[in-house]
Each structure stands twice: as structure tokens, then as C-alpha cells.
């Protein structure tokens, strides 16, 4: 008996040429002991027949939102929640757009909106449709919403073009379904992770401050990924406009000095990740009243250096976290400067990212990072900040001394 026996999948078959692969997928899933129910969109009927799908699933095919018989037997809400996982095969550009925008104008989109279960998409479409900025935006939004993806793969399309957009093979989709349905290991259970995020704000007077463009998105994504791996997670964050991820402890701070103090108070911890964009300097003397504007005479501000939080924690002789990870925000010679920071700051790993304005990393949803350590440099492809976070937390959980 497999770990999947007794679990069930609601398969949503979209309208695309790759829909024929759904039949092979059903066969593979049933062979693994999974119960499969299917919804077919109107367009899916152009590619596979409900009779084939019903024969392979051994169950009735659902295809109408307003079917009286279906609603009496099993309402669409129950249909979307009785399964352990919803899988969309093929996930067409149209279905992804509907999901990203919360549409519910047919049974498939309504089930996807009404579900409280994980959702896995196997996209398939023409390469230009996949690369279109609208589809890119929708895919990014869905990933941020926690939707899982398998593929698409690079390859030759039915339309004769070549590139990304070809649906993953049924065997790959079956493996992704098995992974999604298998309880994940919690390699950071019993471990404490501290993460700094966002900008700091260094006051000039009661109404003005010096800050930067950090949105906190990368740091918050890391905190979310740390919780998924079972870590007790503490976020020490400068002012940002983001919800606190579920299960994460949060200490809000404004200045670099407050951030350092909060980090020191959180020791000991197993992993410390310094993702915040900390102001290197602060105004030496903060005015107690608003500085008055004098015509033709701009005030000169004397600056002093802020404490280096990362270096202070990484070079401690007591309570040094087992793994100290810094970020390096660079606009040129990204790896070279990151290597220098690795040595200068005394940390174990530096995650280097290019923050020049054209990269869109500050405040954006995507990042392209280099992982720099004494072992060498890993170049990761561009991905969403959530994907960077998940991959990085997996890596750190392996690097963490037992
Ligand atoms: O917040 P987002 O919009 O998602 O953007 C993410 C990010 C670009 C801010 C993030 O990925 C990032 O690169 N964070 C580090 C920003 C930074 O301050 O880099 P730095 O190269 O100036 O500093 C190097 C390291 O020292 C960083 O880990 C920083 O947190 C730390 N530092 C810097 C100065 C200081 N006084 N104390 C510190 O601890």
C-alpha cells in the first residue's frame, strides 16, 4: 500500500492540445492508489471526450456549474474541497489569468476559487503566450498566492514553434502530485531562525528621515519559507507595507541601532539571515524640532557611521549563530564585491544580488542571486523572491551544522 492510498485528486482538464496527456496522467495516478475526479472545461471537450475521462477515472465527469443533478449529488464547493489536491492539466493562459484575477464564471474557475486545498498547475501554451508579460505577471501572482507549478518544459510545440510552453510529461506531473501529497520533512524543526528585512529609517528631525527602496519582500519570503521547514522564526523588520507571514514572530524597528539591539536580544539562534537594507550612516544630531526652511540656505547634515549589524553578530565570541548569512546589494562587480563582504563581515554565506535600477530587484517581485561562500559561487537563474527563499532555506538547512 503506497502513502497515497486513500488520497484523492480533483483533476481540472483545460482546453489545449496537451489535454490528451491528462488521460495518461489519470492512468498513472490510479496506479498509485489515488482516487481521481475530473472537471472538464467547455474547451477541453474539443480535445478529449468525457467518456474517455470517465472510463479512466471510474467516476462521473463534472462540467457544468449550473447542473441541477450535480448540485444535488455533490455541490461545486464540496467537489473542490473533498479532494486533497487540485491539479490543472493543461493550465492554459486563460485559466491562469482567471485564477490570478479571481474569476469564477464556470465550474473549473469556481472550484479553483472555492477550494481550501493546495493547487498544482501544469501550464501548456504557445511559447509567445507563455513569455507574454501578461502571462508572466499572472504566473508570478499565482506563485505568490502559493500555487504550485510543474513545468512548462522547453521543446517543440504542436504549433511548430520551439521554446518554453510545452506541458510537463505525465510521469513528471505524477511525481509532482506525489510530492505535493506527501507530508514534507521539517528539517528546521526545533531550530531558531532570525531574519532582518526591509529598510531602516534614520531620522533627521521629527518629520524627515533617510531611508532606501527596500520593500521587505525578499526578507518576508525567507521568513515564510523558514516556517514551512519547521523553524521558530523571528523577523526583525524596518517599516514596510507587508502582512506578517503566518507563524512568524515579528519585532518592528525603525533605525539601525534599534535593529542591532533587537538582533542581540534574539540570540542565541541557529541561523541568522541579514536581508535588511540597513542605512550605513545616520545623522549625527537629530533635531528635536522640525528644521526650518531658510531661503537660499540648505542645512548641512553631519553624518556618523551606523553599527554594522551583520559584522557585529558574525564576529561575536559568544552566542554566534551557527550559520550567519549576509546579503550583498551591488550595482557592479556583483560577485567580486560579495567575496570581499564575505571576508570583511565574517559571515558564512553571502547572497549577492544586483540592485541597479534596471534590475528591478529593490521593491520588485523577482530576484537573481549568486550564492557566495568559501566553497565557491553558485549562480542561480532569475526567479520569484518566494522561489529564491524556498531554495535558499533548503540549502541553509543542509549547511546547518547538526
Ligand atoms: O526588500 P526588497 O525590496 O525585497 O529587496 C531585497 C534587498 C535588495 C534589500 C535584499 O535582497 C538585499 O540585498 N539586502 C541587503 C541590502 C544591503 O544593505 O546590502 P549591503 O551590501 O549594503 O550590506 C551587506 C550586508 O550587511 C547585508 O546583509 C546588510 O543587511 C548588512 N548590513 C549593512 C549595513 C549595516 N550597517 N548593517 C548591516 O547589517
Image (cartoon, grey):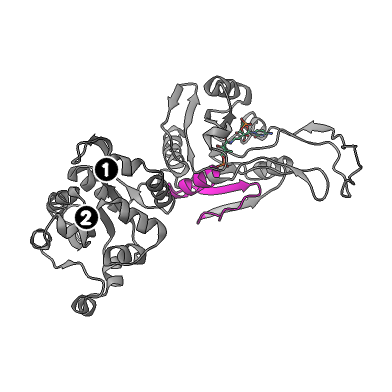
Residues marked 1 and 2 touching at CB (< 8 Å): no
* Mark 1 vs ligand 1: CB below 8 Å: no
Q: Which residue is rendered at x = 87% and y = 49% of the image?
A: 290
Q: Which residue is rendered at x = 18% and y = 41% of the image?
A: 158
Local SS, label 2: loop
Q: Quadrant of residue 108?
A: bottom left
Pick the quarter of the image with the N terminus: bottom left
Which residue is at the front of the view, 202 or 97? Answer: 97
Pick the quarter of the image with the C terminus: top left
Along the polypeptide, which appears first: circle 1 or circle 2? 2
Q: Which residue is mark 1?
A: 126
Q: Which residue is rendered at x = 76% and y = 44% of the image?
A: 209
* Mark 2 vs ligand 1: CB below 8 Å: no
In percent of width and height, residue 98 lies at 35, 58
In percent of width and height, residue 12 lies at 24, 59
Local SS, label 1: loop
Q: Residues within 10 Å of mark 1 (few under 14, many from 20)?
A: many
Q: Residues within 10 Å of mark 2 (few under 14, many from 20)?
A: many
In percent of width and height, residue 87 lies at 26, 55
Q: Is residue 326 visible?
A: no
Distance from disc 1 to disc 2, alpha carbons, whole Å, reads 13 Å
- Residue 15's disc number: 2
Q: Quadrant of residue 195?
A: top right
Q: Which residues are magenta?
A: 218-247
The reply to whether the magenta stretch includes residue 225 is yes
Depicted 356 relative to depicted 137: above or below? above
Q: Is residue 110 visible?
A: yes
Q: Horizontal placement of 59 versus 230: left or right?
A: left
Q: Quadrant of residue 133?
A: top left
Q: Horizontal placement of 328 versus 367: left or right?
A: right
In percent of width and height, residue 74 lies at 23, 75
Quarter containing ligand 1?
top right
Amino acid at each position: 500500500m503506497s502513502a497515497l492510498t486513500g488520497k484523492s485528486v480533483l483533476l481540472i482538464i483545460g482546453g489545449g492540445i496537451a489535454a490528451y496527456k491528462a488521460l495518461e496522467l489519470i492512468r498513472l495516478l490510479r496506479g498509485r492508489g489515488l482516487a481521481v475526479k475530473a472537471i472538464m472545461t467547455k474547451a477541453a471537450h474539443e480535445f478529449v471526450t468525457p467518456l474517455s475521462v470517465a472510463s479512466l477515472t471510474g467516476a462521473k465527469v463534472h462540467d457544468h456549474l449550473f447542473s441541477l443533478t450535480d448540485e444535488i449529488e455533490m455541490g461545486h464547493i464540496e467537489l473542490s474541497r473533498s479532494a486533497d489536491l487540485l491539479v490543472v492539466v493543461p493550465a492554459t493562459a486563460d485559466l491562469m489569468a482567471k485564477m490570478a484575477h479571481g474569476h469564477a464564471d464556470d465550474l473549473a474557475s469556481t472550484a479553483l476559487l472555492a477550494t481550501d486545498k493546495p493547487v498544482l498547475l501544469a501550464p501548456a501554451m504557445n511559447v509567445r503566450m507563455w513569455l507574454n508579460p501578461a502571462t508572466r505577471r499572472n504566473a508570478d501572482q499565482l506563485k505568490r498566492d502559493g500555487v504550485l507549478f510543474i513545468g512548462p518544459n522547453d521543446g517543440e510545440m504542436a504549433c511548430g514553434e520551439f521554446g518554453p510552453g510545452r506541458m510537463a510529461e505525465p510521469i513528471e506531473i505524477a511525481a509532482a502530485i506525489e510530492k505535493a501529497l506527501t507530508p514534507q520533512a521539517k528539517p528546521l524543526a526545533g531550530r531558531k531562525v532570525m531574519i532582518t528585512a526591509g529598510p531602516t529609517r534614520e531620522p533627521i528631525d521629527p518629520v524627515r528621515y533617510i531611508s532606501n527602496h527596500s520593500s521587505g519582500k525578499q526578507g518576508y519570503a525567507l521568513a515564510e519559507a523558514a516556517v514551512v521547514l519547521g523553524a521558530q522564526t523571528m523577523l526583525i523588520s524596518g517599516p514596510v507595507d507587508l502582512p506578517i507571514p503566518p507563524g512568524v514572530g515579528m519585532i518592528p524597528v525603525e533605525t539601525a541601532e534599534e535593529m542591532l539591539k533587537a538582533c542581540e536580544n534574539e540570540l542565541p539562534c541557529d541561523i541568522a539571515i541579514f536581508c535588511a537594507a540597513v542605512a550605513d550612516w545616520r545623522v549625527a544630531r537629530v533635531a528635536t524640532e522640525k528644521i526650518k526652511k531658510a531661503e537660499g540656505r540648505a542645512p548641512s547634515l553631519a553624518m556618523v557611521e551606523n553599527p554594522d549589524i551583520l559584522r557585529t553578530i558574525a564576529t561575536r565570541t559568544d552566542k554566534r549563530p551557527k550559520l550567519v548569512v549576509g546579503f550583498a546589494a551591488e550595482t557592479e562587480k556583483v560577485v567580486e564585491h560579495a567575496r570581499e563582504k564575505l571576508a570583511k563581515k565574517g559571515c558564512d554565506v553571502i547572497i549577492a544580488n544586483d540592485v541597479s535600477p534596471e534590475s528591478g530587484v529593490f521593491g520588485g517581485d523577482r530576484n537573481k542571486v549568486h550564492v557566495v561562500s568559501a566553497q565557491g559561487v553558485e549562480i542561480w537563474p532569475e526567479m520569484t523572491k518566494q522561489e529564491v527563499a524556498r531554495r535558499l532555506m533548503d540549502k541553509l538547512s543542509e549547511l546547518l551544522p547538526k
